[in-house]
Image (tube, helix red, strand yellow):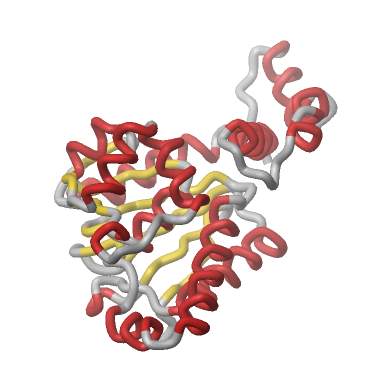
């Protein structure tokens, strides 16, 4: 059975981390699977929206699989290869052209935090907890991971999380800007559905262009100014704008493809 599953319903795709018995801990194979699914989403499925969820009610992801990590630590070459796959998978998720929502149902640590930070919107159950712990292992957070954290929280709070390695609860994560909304576990699925419905009503062209613009402003080297700046003018030539303008003039409700 696959530890990550991909399903598609209409314009919405859902990636589910399905290893609840191990608190949805990630193996190297799972990171590769995530990268492969991101390629499939971007090149073939092309959804309007992606939900990233996890099985069970205890953890979104507790990070790396402990047994595999012990083996990797003993082999620096394998550890370097694993790190490369993790970074590749996270970048692919971050750079998906569709909107992405992380639906966080519990503990979110290490690689789980990495995945959540790659998503555009983060929703969480009120019992969720968050931590970034490389300082407890004598390690560093990567440049890409650190940039995502600073872009979400600001430098001061990012420093506290990175330096201390301490856990914060969902209420604190919301206050600090890590999360967009916190609800009860019972309401999490419906809240995610409400967010999804809202995003499906707006223009995919707008979402894609705005996402690339913000990526440029956030320091992603994949989106230099010369690639992003023309998108503003090009939007006026797209069918979405023409359709929306006609609907506005005729006092009608626009329905984007």
Q: Residue furthest front?
A: 138
The front one of 52 and 171 is 171
Location of residue 245 by image quarter: top right
206 vs 143: above or below: above
Whether residue 203 is visible: no
Left of 144 or right of it: where is 234? right
Q: Position of residue 227 (x, y in %)?
A: 79, 37
183 vs 36: above or below: above
Whether residue 93 is visible: yes
The front one of 233 and 202 is 233
The front one of 183 and 154 is 154
Q: Position of residue 104 (x, y in %)?
A: 30, 53
- Which residue appears at 70% of the width and 64% of the height? 44
- Which residue appears at 66% of the width and 59% of the height? 42
Q: Position of residue 183 (x, y in %)?
A: 21, 41
Left of 157 or right of it: where is 52? right
Question: How many numbered discs, if any?
Answer: 0
- Which residue appears at 55% of the width and 34% of the height? 201
Quadrant occupied by the N terminus: bottom left
Quadrant occupied by the C terminus: top right
Location of residue 84 by image quarter: bottom right
Q: Position of residue 173 (x, y in %)?
A: 25, 39
- Which residue appears at 65% of the width and 67% of the height? 40
The front one of 139 and 153 is 139
Left of 112 or right of it: where is 183? left
């Amino acid at each position: 059975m696959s530890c990550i599953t991909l399903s598609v319903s209409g314009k919405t795709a859902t990636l589910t981390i399905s290893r609840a018995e191990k608190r949805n801990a990630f193996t190297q194979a799972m990171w590769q699977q995530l990268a492969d699914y991101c390629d499939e989403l971007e090149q073939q499925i092309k959804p309007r929206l992606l939900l990233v969820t996890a099985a069970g009610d205890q953890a979104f992801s507790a990070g790396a699989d402990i047994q595999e990590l012990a083996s990797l630590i003993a082999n620096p070459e394998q550890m370097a290869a694993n790190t490369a796959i993790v970074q590749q998978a996270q970048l692919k998720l971050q750079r998906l052209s569709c909107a992405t929502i992380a639906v966080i149902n519990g503990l979110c640590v290490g690689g789980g935090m990495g995945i959540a930070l790659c998503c555009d919107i983060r929703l969480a159950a009120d019992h969720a907890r968050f931590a970034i712990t490389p300082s407890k292992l004598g390690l560093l957070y990567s440049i890409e991971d650190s940039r995502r954290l600073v872009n979400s929280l600001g430098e001061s709070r990012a420093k506290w999380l990175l330096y201390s390695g301490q856990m914060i609860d969902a209420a604190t994560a919301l206050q600090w800007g890590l999360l967009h909304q916190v609800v009860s576990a019972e309401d999490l699925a419906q809240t995610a559905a409400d967010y999804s419905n809202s995003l499906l009503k707006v223009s995919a062209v707008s979402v894609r262009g705005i996402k690339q613009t913000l990526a440029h402003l956030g320091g992603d080297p994949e989106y230099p100014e010369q690639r992003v700046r023309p998108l503003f003018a090009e939007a006026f030539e797209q069918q979405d704008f023409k359709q929306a303008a006609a609907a506005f003039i005729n006092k009608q409700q626009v329905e984007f493809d």
